[in-house]
Image: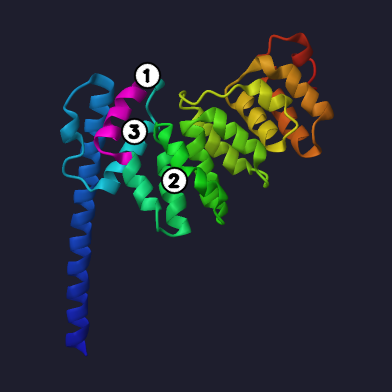
Amino acid sequence: MIVFTLFYLIFGGAILLIYRRLSLRSVRAEMAAIERISSFITQGEGEVMIIGRGIAKMSFVRCLVFVADRTAEDAVETMQIILRYYHIESYLLKRIEGSSSREKAYYLALLARLPISKVVAGKVSKYMKNSSSDVRFYALLCMLAAVPELAVRYISELDERLSRRDIAEMLSVIGRGYCPIPYTPLLLSNNYNMQLLGIAMVRRFGIYESCKDLMHLVEYGEPELRMDALEALAYMSADCSDDSCSGYVV
């Protein structure tokens, strides 16, 4: 019994050691890839064919997402060069096909975090009718990243109401700067989801010109949205130059 216990301890320790070494190797590869991606898109250093060298494709995708989330709008075109060279869009679209609902949602979420082309919108639109709410949402997020004006139409046609968490994820895509959406039509809409997104946008980005529209929502909007509008108005009132806006919040 002691011999078997000792054997299992030795065997388990060896497996753990191998796992740690492989994990460390993977982390180093990802760090190197992130450094190469960053140098390429910010300083034009290195060649595109070596950026993804020595790292698994999915790990490379995650590195691209990591950098894309921290990249300014003026680096979008350079990032898209990398996406095209490594066929990242088609790779993720193929992974989506035939995968489970959970995996579909994950791959769609990765796509949405990248500066994808408008072609992707046509490829993922079919997932807007998926039975999984997560798949439907991340397909919508891809639409928002690829074709914002089309995504707004889809938002207005949603049967279910978006959650605050959903809105927060949308703002993370809009906030990257290459997903322009006019806020006024959202606030003036009679659609709950569009108004909720509009309120969140003007608060997040400090759009003080929206104060009067927010006041209108506080007074006449849906009960579920009045508090959101009031909180946004209160958040911006200190810096709002409009006297009627600053005087509204008590």
Residue 91 lies, with reference to residue 173, above or below; the image says below
> Which span of residues is magenta-colored?
75-88
Q: Residue at x 68, y 44 (%)?
A: 161
The spot of residue 132 in percent (x, y) is: 55, 55
Residue 200, picture quadrant: top right
- The label on residue 67 is 3
Residues packed near mark 2 inside 10 Å, few (<14), some (14 to 19) or many (20 plus): many
Camera-nearest residue between 244 and 128: 128
Q: CA distance from mark 2 to mark 3?
A: 17 Å
The spot of residue 144 in percent (x, y) is: 51, 34
Left or right of 193, for residue 57: left
Could you tell me the amino acid type at mark 3? Val
Residue 111, picture quadrant: top left
Determine if residue 40 is in view: yes
The spot of residue 216 in percent (x, y) is: 79, 23
Q: Which residue is mark 2?
A: 108
Q: Nearer the viewer, mark 2 or mark 3?
A: 2
